[in-house]
Amino acid sequence: MTLKLIVWRQAAPGKPGRFETYTAKNITEHHSFLEMLDVVNEDLIKEGKPPIVFDHDCREGICGVCSQVINGVPHGGQERTTVCQLHMRKFKDGDTIYIEPWRARAFPILKDLMVDRGALDKIIQAGGYISAHTGGAPDANAIPVPRPNAEYSMDAAECIGCGACVAGCPNGAAMLFTGAKVSQFAALPQGQVEAAERVANMLQAMQDCGFGNCTNHYECQAACPKGIDVKFIARLNREYLKALF
């Protein structure tokens, strides 16, 4: 199939960006979206033109690096699918596809479709871990964890930190990401020791990084390629209220 691509190009941070039009030729339904861009880039390189810069790593839907807004929707809008797992069978011959980077104040554009998502790392560095010294590794069953708590924690831990929730939110909020990272520890006994300090520090880091606040649009849940539920935002708010007393 042949496709018309309208792609955001930006030479460097702070430089003016613009949409440019390209033609993707000889694309099959078996190509992934990133493989389609690889084909386009090979043609650009042969023509002596700079290739389109975009993030990618595992290409297995695990790392979440492949952040792109496709036709106005983070990761392309296919349920529970990252860009790298999105295949061209979703499109048809002659389609026009708009491709943009994440749009959020906390995610400055580095080049073309690549953004700096280091703000999410700063939130994790503020408390998204357990540092309490507990001695040597205990036996697996030394600290019993109820199965519902373990499953709840695992559901929260599914967040891969891709930032689609931020890109989908009209406020550029990172509440779903932060809520998932706080909730995965809040449900476990090992996470109780630093619970109050954790939620306070991570929310402060979120604010310092320039993320907006949640106003219950639910776009974050709709955009998430891992199906992270907004219930973790409610848990985040409850943990913060508990930390105040």
Image: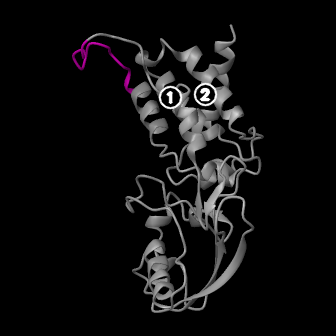
What label sits on residue 202 in the rendered view? 2
Asked if the residues shown at circle 2 and circle 1 are in contact, with their CB atoms under 8 angstroms apart, the answer is: yes
Q: Is residue 86 left or right of residue 173?
A: left
Expressed as whole percent of the image width and height from the top left, the position of residue 16 reads 75, 67
Q: Secondary structure at mark 1?
A: loop
- Residue 155, magenta (yes or no): no
> What's under tag 2, amino acid-wise?
Met
Separation of marks 2 and 1 at Cα, in angstroms? 7 Å
| Dot placed on the residue nearer the N-terminal end, 2 or 1 | 1
Is residue 141 located in the magenta-colored stretch of the structure? yes
Mark 2: secondary structure: helix
Main secondary structure found in the magenta portion = loop
Name the spot of residue 149 as percent of width and height, x first.
Answer: 44, 25
- Magenta segment, which residues? 136-147
The answer, for residue 229, to whether it is visible in the render is no
Q: Residue at x 39, y 80 (%)?
A: 30
Residue corresponding to mark 1: 128
Q: Is residue 48 visible?
A: yes
Frontmost residue, 61 versus 51: 51
Image location (x, y in percent) of residue 162 = 53, 50
Does residue 232 appear left or right of residue 194 in this picture? right
